[in-house]
Image (cartoon, helix red, strand yellow):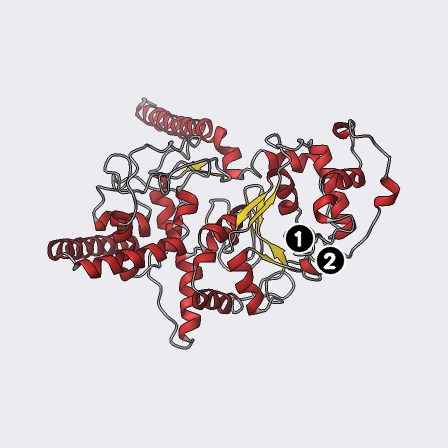
Amino acid sequence: MIAGFRLFAAFALAVGLGSLSASVRAQGPAPADQAALVEKGRYLAVAGDCRACHTNPQGGKPFAGGYALASPLGSIVSSNITPSKRYGIGNYTEQQFVRALREGIRGDGAHLYPAMPYTSYTRLNDEDVRALYAYFMHGVAAVDEPAATTNLPFPFNLRIAMLGWNLLFLDDRRFVPDGGKSAQWNRGAYLVNALEHCDACHTPRNILMAEKSGRAFAGAPLGPWYAPNITSDPVSGIGGWTDRELVEYLKTGHVAGRDQAAGGMAEAVENSLQFLSDDDLQAVALYLKSVAPVRDARETKPAYAYGAPASFEAVLRGASGPNERNTVTSGEALYSGYCASCHQPTGAGSGNQAYPSLFHNGATGSPTAANLVAAVLFGVDRTSVNERQVLMPRFDELSYVNPLSDEQIAAVSNFVLGQFGNPSVQVTAAEVALARQGGPTSPLALAAPYLLPGAILFAAIVLGLIVLRYRRRRAARVLANEPR
């Protein structure tokens, strides 16, 4: 009954939007109104962080797709969303654009994976969706190049399965302002939960890859990185941050004595957050400070409260020569050779904190060392509003300095944790190897090779039981008809 009603409502909505779209196209907005609508859509697309995911960081053209997004089920490649009629969304009607954005259904009827955060975008209001459509159709250059395709293992390559997933987990409704809250709070709630889709990264997921209810913004693994707790809890979350610090972090990706953005968060700052208006950033900060607190039982004090400066450099002088770099396994020696020149022997970082302090730092004080390990492996590269590039070299196999082994990265990470961060956290070489490969794999993905044989075995068992039952009934009938 409910499912039928939802399907009927979706059909009615589609018909209504289709009629509205046809009316708008028939009348056509005035040139000045069209320009204003496109500009509004541009700002919304920035707030929605569309460019970060739909642009290949390896020299790709804006919105042309091709960015492989790491997921616990495999890499999901973003599509071309330029107005190219051959490879992009140039043939999309406004109704089709609405369905893709809010329901995760492409123009050809195929289902999108929720790596495209339509579970958040479904909250967008009609005016903003219309502005986004205008921008992508009239404000983005068409790129007539195909993006690589997504090839997930069976059965995740069956996009039709998303139909059932959506029925279970897609809450297809628009954002409704809370009349008991201020306009600024409601703006922050709309940005955080709809456009910026913060929950998509910062909320843990269940075995079916849906966000866990009651754990909103409590922190979650994101490939080799970890999206931290951003609830209002003063220990596990951002409750101890001031509004000014939150705004500074969103705009620059760094707050001395608190944390710095890397990985996906660095991309969000570089492509989206730093371009929002101060009013919008303040609204985001206000809303996040109101989010229900969620405490991690492992934490007794904030991650940024750990550590103090310490120096050990003098005892290492002359311990190894310049040609012994690949054989050094001591965490102290590795830190001295690879880290101290930027982060200082005492771990205090540079004077302007372009190279951050390693104590009073969320990456080293967290109950998980994921972000510390990922930063060493993959480095940090972001550009803030003042056009200053923040760069930390990577030390994986693509390093242009000198690659470090899993054992070496574990050793230097453990030294940093013990010397400057949370000493109760330890890193193993196996954990580094897992991060190097892209992070933990979902139990669902691990079970994938057994799903088809399991389904066949289950079907065979069911068929066998049916045949056995039929034969027993037939034998019973034969016995009942035999002469006594």
Q: Residue furthest left?
A: 26
- Classed neighbour count for the residue bearing mark 2: other residues with Cα under 10 Å, few (<14), some (14–19), many (≥20): many
Residue 419's x, y, as percent?
Answer: 78, 50
* Residue 327, above or below 102: above
In this rendered view, identify the residue nearer to me: 440 or 183. Answer: 183
Left or right of 469? Residue 246 is right
Give SS at disc 2.
loop
Residue found at x 50% / y 69%? 286
* Residue 165, above or below 326: below
Which quarter of the rendered picture does the N terminus lie within? bottom left
Q: Residue furthest right?
A: 315
Closer to the N terminus: mark 1 or mark 2?
2
Q: Amino acid at mark 1?
A: Pro
Residue found at x 17% / y 53%? 18
Residue 109's x, y, as percent?
Answer: 26, 40
Disc 2: which residue: 306
In this rendered view, identify the residue nearer to me: 308 or 101. Answer: 308
Identify the mark at residue 356; answer none if there is no mark: 1
Q: Amino acid at mark 2?
A: Tyr
Asked whether residue 203 appears in the rendered view, the answer is no
